[in-house]
Amino acid sequence: MEDYRKTVDIIIPKANQAKDTLSLAKSNEYLGDYFGKKFQSEKAYSYYFDAEKLYSVKKEYAKTAKVVLNKAIIQLNEKDFVGSEKSVFKALKLLQKENDEDLRYQGTNILGIIYDELAEYRKSIEYYNKALQIASTGNVSVAMQAKATTLNNLGALYQKEHKYKEALGYFNQSLQQEHLYEDNPLLYGNLKYNIGYSMFKLNDYSLLPKLYYDALKIADSLQFAPNIIACNLNLSEFYLVQSDTSRAYDFASKAYFLAKTNRIPKDILTSLKQLALSNPKKKSDYSEQYIKITDSLQLAERQIRNKLGRIEYETDQLVTEKANLVEQRKTLIYIALGIILIGVFIFVIRFQAAKNRELRLVQEQQAANEEIYRLMITQQDKVEETRQAEKRRIAQEIHDGVLGKLFGTRMHLGLLNDKEGNDAKMERVVYIDELKTLEQELREISHDLNSEKQAVANNFVQMVMHFIDTQRTVCKAEITITMDKTIEWTAVDSLAKINLYRILQEAFQNVNKHAQANQVNVVFDKTEGQVRLVIQDDGVGFNYTKKKKGIGMLNMRSRISSSGGSMDVITGLGQGTLLEFTLPMEDVVV
């Protein structure tokens, strides 16, 4: 039996680990059987109750009914007749969903025993007869010896009512069932001493004490304490009637010892009573023990019954508490999820608002770009208009002034070709001085034209210088600018100059926002027929190959590309940033 217990102890952790509910239920059921045979009712009941819960989860109705019936037997042994009755009816209700006649028979038979113990004999006989009907259908396992069992129970009932002849009839009928000894030797032994006891009460000693010894031998071979105790008590009673008090006392002592060893209260009391009859000298001692044990047993029985009820109550409470904890955990999870969702919602709203602000800024920047472009075009138109007006004025000056004078001087010099003498020479000197005057006028006109060209060229330069001066007031870094004076800005397309100006603005916006620079150098120079813009800072730099290109960098590349130029970026983490832009110059006559 101990090996059986060890095997179950090995199975339980593995079943828990594998989350195998059925194996765990079976293990609890086996432990209930183990402690039941050890007459440890409380532990047996607890394991059966755990098995019941597990089987219920898996909707194993027949197996659930089986462990509930085992609980009912424990309650019956502990004289919790009401609890036992409830358990049986619960099992029978479960069996309505299953076609298991073996278990239905067992439940009905147990009800007969319960009502027998409650002295409700008519009701007990009614259920015993129902059990016999179930046993007679042929659907009950033959090996159970169901009919023999119930006939034995009916015999015991009539024996209790002192109807020994009727009892003998049922016992003998039970004993005649085929293969009884092979299928159920324990029941066979029971019938031996039950028949012997009924004959003893009828003063028929013809088969006594042989029947008792036969029953004792079977009980010893099976190591079943209750039957061994019953046989010893029957033999003690028999030898006491035969006036063999020594043997009577000896068998009563054996029964008492076994009853105490196995903690069987009912048999302890019966043994004490028999000891008092077998040894009158110690009758008062045994009677006193009997009274004490009776009182303690009554208290113990009440406590056990309360414990059995409490096991279910406390387990149900634990289940309820567990369910409440699960609900609380669910509530906490829902609250946490709600907070997370609200947080995500707020983040999305703020992120979307930031994106909207960025989009508005881009739109505003685009509008500003368009406005600057429009202003620059307007300014360029005004400059062009001024240039045209100045050209017309100079053309008018040349036409009306210089050309007229040249024509007159040429005519007079032509006339002087035919003249000789000092007067002619003097006139020639006058007209030569006139030519010098015309030369001076042409030089002045040329100077005016050159100044106009320089003014037009200086217009873009002034815009750039004004922007740099503005940045020096807002930028934390020191800004230096180098402007190559040999750049022929008139050879650069107007839109290209606008793009260069906007690139410069975008670059400084990045410097102000991200670079954390101490020094920024701006260079406009000319190389191989191209205008070059270089913007270099000593800031934190960035990983250009991995960093997602921002809209600023994309705008700069787009602008320089639209003007037929190119853009290069040299940067790295902690290495500052260098932006280089090149633009082709137009072939113009200067």
Image (cartoon, rainbow, N blue to C red):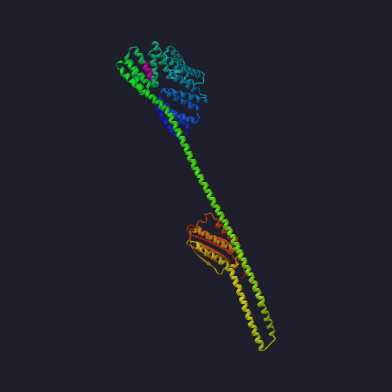
In percent of width and height, residue 44 lies at 42, 27
In the rendered view, does 508 fall on the left or right side of 313?
A: right
Q: How many marks?
A: 0
Residue 332, relative to residue 573: is it above or below?
above
Query: Can the viewer see residue 587 in this picture?
Result: no
Q: Residue 288 in magenta?
A: no
User: Is residue 202 or residue 214 the one in the foreground?
Assistant: 202
In percent of width and height, residue 21 lies at 47, 32
Quarter of the image with the C terminus is bottom right
Residue 212 lies in quadrant? top left
Residue span colored magenta = 228-234
Residue 179, relative to residue 434: is it above or below?
above
Query: Can the viewer see residue 23 in this picture?
Result: yes
In the rendered view, does 23 fall on the left or right side of 588?
A: left
Task: Tell me what residue is drawn at x 58 percent, y 59 percent.
Answer: 368
Q: Residue furthest left?
A: 281
In percent of width and height, residue 490 lies at 60, 68
